[in-house]
Image (spheres, helix red, strand yellow):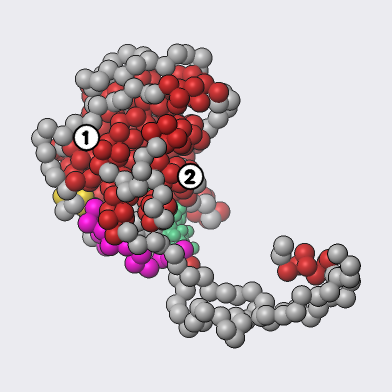
Amino acid sequence: MTTSNIETATSSQPEAPAAVAPADAKVAPERPYSPGLEGVIAAETAVGFVDGANGRLLYRGYPIGQLVEKGTYGRVAELLWTGEWRKSARLAPAVVPDPVLCALRELPMHTHPMDALRTAVSVWGAWRRPHWPPTVDQARELTAFAPSALAAFHRLRNGLEPVKPNQKLSLAGGFLQQLNGKDPDPADARALDAYFIVGAEHGLNASTFTCRVIISTRSDLASAICGAIGALKGPLHGGAPAEVVSQLHEIGSPENAEQWVREAIARGDKIMGFGHRVYRAYDPRAAALRKVAEGMADMAEWLDIAVKVEDVVLRVFGELKPDRVIKTNVEYYAAAVLQGVGLPPDLFPPTFALARMAGWGAHAIEQASADKLIRPDARYVGPAEMEVPSLGSR
Ligand code: ACO
């Protein structure tokens, strides 16, 4: 019950209480408070390094651009989990277990695919009962099963039966095959694999932090991943690429870009696919995905518009917001790749979740080895201690 509820429930209203901490409060009021935990170091990690000032992203020391050029998602996931860069490392798409398939069949057709994925992971956890501490085998199994579960849900909601994965394909290729019921074009599978690599890990973002908090209580990996998916579902975290697509549709052609961008900024709207909390330079993931998108024949026309619009947006930001470095972020070119491989926009956020499974798993394993409960303090700003008003008979 809030203070205002209490006030309306009493006949003789007490004086408004002073918003000060009680004298015996355990939290020292002078301790710094950082809204949104911005700038707070809440963990030590050897998994990934987001160097915002210089536009660098390293997974276990290796730059993201080189990992996209020389790696596969299976190899990169293994690197994140174990620290080893192995040629033989590979992740094949797994069969969806019956309990998960039964649960997916029961979901209403209008279920958001992000909710369907979270449900699938939850049922997987109930079925497999992964124990704490999380292991590389658990992370491998969960990461290999999730794309198949999401594809199965997508087919079911379209009135189609799920298909078994072709386990000779990569995880990204198997996802496309299970969505469409046929083996994918190898170039599409490779492009989606590259997207999976750039989405695999990004430091202590909100979903990864959520995952670590849950693991820190010695809860299991499936619970932690369910929580992480819940955090990623929020539009401030995982929702931008679909909006990039509708934004470019709205702009229509590069000639309209300048006026559209100036009007949007004047209204105080955010231009999707630009700006980042950490990067003050061009997002290295955007650069890597732009290269991938340039290799996709079907995307040539869309990309031509996207590149021209990007030039205009960056120039207008430079002019209107000279004190703030606002550059292209990963979501701008993620939109091109995801659209180019034929995914509908509502599958963009859960596909991001499929990619991030590797990073979540790696952070879960690392957090468990630190084995320290994450439990910050809150600064108390409520009323000082006071007598409960007597309301007469109970
Ligand atoms: N469009 C317009 N103005 C912007 C943008 C943008 N995309 N990004 C930042 N700004 C402006 C803000 O209006 C603000 O200007 P002001 O100081 O004149 O008020 C200033 O830059 C600071 O903006 P904040 O939102 O406070 O910066 P923050 O670092 O908190 O935000 C964020 C980062 C949320 C990503 C923001 O840039 C944004 O909303 N971008 C658009 C959405 C998007 O592309 N999200 C995907 C991010 S990448 C990812 O999550 C994987």
Q: Quadrant of ligand 1?
A: bottom left
Which stretch did the figure color magenta?
Answer: 36-53
Horizontal and vertical percent for residue 245? Answer: 43, 35
Magenta stretch encompasses residue 44: yes
Q: Nearer the viewer, residue 4 or 71?
A: 4
Q: Residue at x 55, y 30 (%)?
A: 111
Horizontal and vertical percent for residue 312? Answer: 37, 47
Counting other residues with Cα less than 10 Å from the Cα at mark 1, is it few (<14), some (14-19), or many (20 or more)?
many
Q: Which of 109 and 11 is in front in this view?
A: 11
Quick one: quadrant of the N terminus? bottom right
Is the stretch drawn in magenta largely helix, strand or loop? loop
State which quadrant residue 172 falls in.
top left
Q: Residue at x 34, y 35 (%)?
A: 142
Q: In this view, does 149 lie above or below 251?
A: above
Magenta stretch encompasses residue 10: no
Horizontal and vertical percent for residue 202? Answer: 31, 51
SS type, badge 2: helix
Q: Nearer the viewer, residue 123 or 119?
A: 123
Report, in whole angstroms, how far the alpha carbon at label 1 lies from the one at label 2.
24 Å
Q: Name the residue under label 1.
A: 74
Amino acid carrying label 2: it is Gly
Q: Where residue 15 is drawn, which disc sits there?
A: none
Amino acid carrying label 1: it is Gly
Q: Nearer the viewer, residue 147 or 68?
A: 147
Q: Are marks 1 and 2 in contact (CB under 8 Å)?
A: no
Q: Is residue 35 visible to us here?
A: yes
Q: Mark 2 points at which residue?
A: 230
State left or right for residue 218 relative to residue 293.
right
Q: Is residue 50 visible to us here?
A: no
Horizontal and vertical percent for residue 178? Answer: 36, 19
